[in-house]
Image: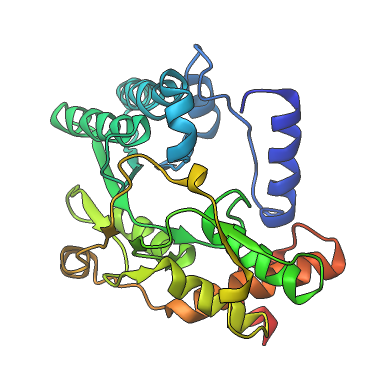
């Protein structure tokens, strides 16, 4: 986190979803590193999921993206190794990477983080990384296209918006539910030996498929009359399709994604309808689709 306001927002979100979990807020750019926190918590498992997640924003701040996604990972792994050597405790580390494979500073920073993981593993640390395909949940920030679509569909259904503006609608992505991929991540740290993997559903859908599902979940008809295109939203080097090969994860972990695409999209829309109707942005009930049925 970078500012006091950021810290307050992080604590507010955590209090809604992690009421039974101890929460520490740490600035990834803190030159003190992760050592003091490791000494305080003494974890056996470290899941490093923090970082800069916007491809578009990385073009505007490549140095900042590298500092958070690349250099901070190197410091974390070094600090975990130092903690392990000092205490003799077995610590396993997971580092989130990305399936995005384009010329963006974001993708380059994540590939550099993967190299840090491999180097740490070669030096004896139990560490893995996973290339995660798109994993969606209602906690996704509204600037991401999935939440933009779900929130706008909900707003149109409630008479609070009249159009949805998108960039490249021809892209196809492997969109899965975050709770499925997080289970895969958990299993990765329970392997007999550390192995890097790719996690995704293995099925690609077009962006317009997502729009169609979202409008249906909101009780709307054909989305076409509401759609607008803005060429300024196009991203340089945006891949036409990204889809996982789920076979290695199934073989290594016995894991596969189980939430259907339409159920995932419906979960996002139903949550955004609830948010707009109630004015409550964060609630534990938003985490699980079953809460709505």
What residue is rendered at 33% in x and 34% in y?
104
Give the side of residue 253 with respect to residue 140, left or right: left
Give the side of residue 180 with respect to residue 274, left or right: left
Direction top: furthest residue: 31
- Above or below, comparing residue 72 to residue 287 in the picture: above
- Above or below, comparing residue 289 to residue 40 in the picture: below
What residue is rendered at 35% in x and 62% in y?
173
> The C terminus appears in which quarter of the rendering?
bottom right
Number of marks in the image? 0
> The N terminus appears in which quarter of the rendering?
top right
Whole-percent x and y of residue 270?
67, 75
What residue is rendered at 34% in x and 40% in y?
93
What residue is rendered at 18% in x and 33% in y?
118
Residue 288 appearing in the image: no
Of the pair 38 and 172, the residue shown nearer to us: 172
Residue 248 appearing in the image: yes
- Above or below, comparing residue 146 to residue 2 in the picture: below
Give the side of residue 216 with respect to residue 182, left or right: right
Occupied quadrant, residue 83: top left
């Amino acid at each position: 986190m970078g500012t006091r306001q950021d810290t307050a927002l992080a604590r507010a979100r955590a209090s809604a979803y992690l009421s039974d979990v101890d929460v520490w807020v740490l600035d990834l750019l803190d030159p003190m590193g992760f050592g003091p926190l490791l000494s305080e918590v003494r974890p056996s498992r470290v899941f490093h999921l923090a970082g800069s997640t916007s491809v578009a924003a990385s073009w505007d701040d490549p140095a900042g993206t590298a500092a958070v996604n690349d250099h901070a990972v190197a410091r974390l792994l070094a600090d975990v190794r130092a903690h392990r050597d000092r205490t003799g405790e077995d610590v396993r580390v997971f580092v989130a990477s990305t399936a995005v494979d384009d010329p963006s500073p974001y993708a380059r920073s994540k590939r550099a983080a993967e190299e840090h993981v491999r180097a740490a593993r070669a030096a004896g640390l139990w560490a893995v990384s996973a290339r995660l395909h798109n994993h969606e949940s209602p906690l996704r920030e509204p600037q991401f296209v999935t939440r933009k679509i779900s929130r706008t569909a909900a707003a149109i259904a409630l008479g609070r918006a009249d159009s949805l503006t998108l960039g490249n609608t021809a892209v196809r992505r492997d969109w899965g539910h975050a709770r499925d991929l997080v289970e895969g991540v958990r299993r990765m740290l329970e392997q007999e030996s550390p192995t890097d993997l790719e996690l995704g559903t293995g099925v690609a859908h077009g962006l317009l498929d997502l729009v169609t599902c979202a409008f249906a979940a909101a009780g709307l008809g054909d989305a076409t009359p509401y759609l607008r295109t803005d060429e300024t939203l196009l991203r340089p080097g945006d891949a036409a399709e990204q889809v996982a090969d789920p076979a290695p994860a199934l073989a290594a972990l016995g894991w596969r994604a189980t939430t259907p695409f339409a159920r995932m999209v419906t979960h996002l829309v139903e949550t955004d309808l609830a948010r707009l109707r109630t004015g409550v942005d964060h609630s534990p009930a938003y985490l699980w689709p079953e809460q709505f049925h």
